[in-house]
Image (cartoon, grey):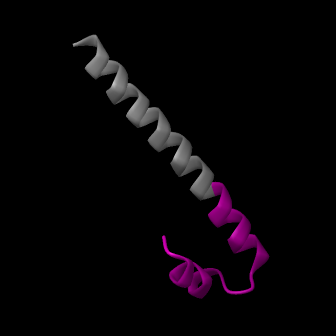
């Protein structure tokens, strides 16, 4: 998500910013795992 929409959603609420940060880290880790799996599948071909 872009910075501007994130600022609009979270505002000055520290809990929302912390939640957004945790969600972003989790999403990136899941994407990394997903693409690693695809890469491994392609190498196996």
| Residue 21 drawn at (x, y percent) | 66, 61
Residue under the image location 64 percent in, 80 percent down: 10
Residue span colored magenta: 1-22
Foreground of the two, 14 or 41: 41
Q: Is residue 8 above or below residue 15?
A: below
| Residue 26 drawn at (x, y percent) | 58, 48
Foreground of the two, 45 or 10: 45
Magenta highlight on residue 6: yes
Left or right of 5? Residue 21 is right
Image quadrant where one finds the C terminus? top left
Q: Is residue 26 above or below residue 11?
A: above
| Residue 37 drawn at (x, y percent) | 38, 26
* Quarter of the image where one finds residue 15: bottom right
Seen as rendered, the residue at the extreme left is: 45
Residue under the image location 69 percent in, 73 percent down: 16
* Quarter of the image where one finds residue 29: top right
Q: Is residue 43 above or below residue 24?
A: above
Q: Main secondary structure of the magenta part?
A: helix
Residue under the image location 74 percent in, 86 percent down: 12
* Quarter of the image where one finds residue 31: top left
Left or right of 34? Residue 7 is right
Left or right of 18? Residue 5 is left
Left or right of 41? Residue 36 is right
Seen as rendered, the residue at the extreme top is: 44
Q: Is residue 20 above or below residue 44?
A: below
Q: How many marks?
A: 0
Residue under the image location 48 percent in, 70 percent down: 1
| Residue 44 drawn at (x, y percent) | 28, 12
Seen as rendered, the residue at the extreme front is: 43
């Amino acid at each position: 998500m872009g910075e501007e929409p994130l600022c609009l959603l979270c505002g000055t609420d520290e809990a929302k910013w912390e939640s957004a940060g945790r969600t972003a880290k989790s999403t990136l880790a899941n994407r990394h795992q997903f693409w690693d799996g695809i890469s491994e599948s392609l190498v196996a071909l």
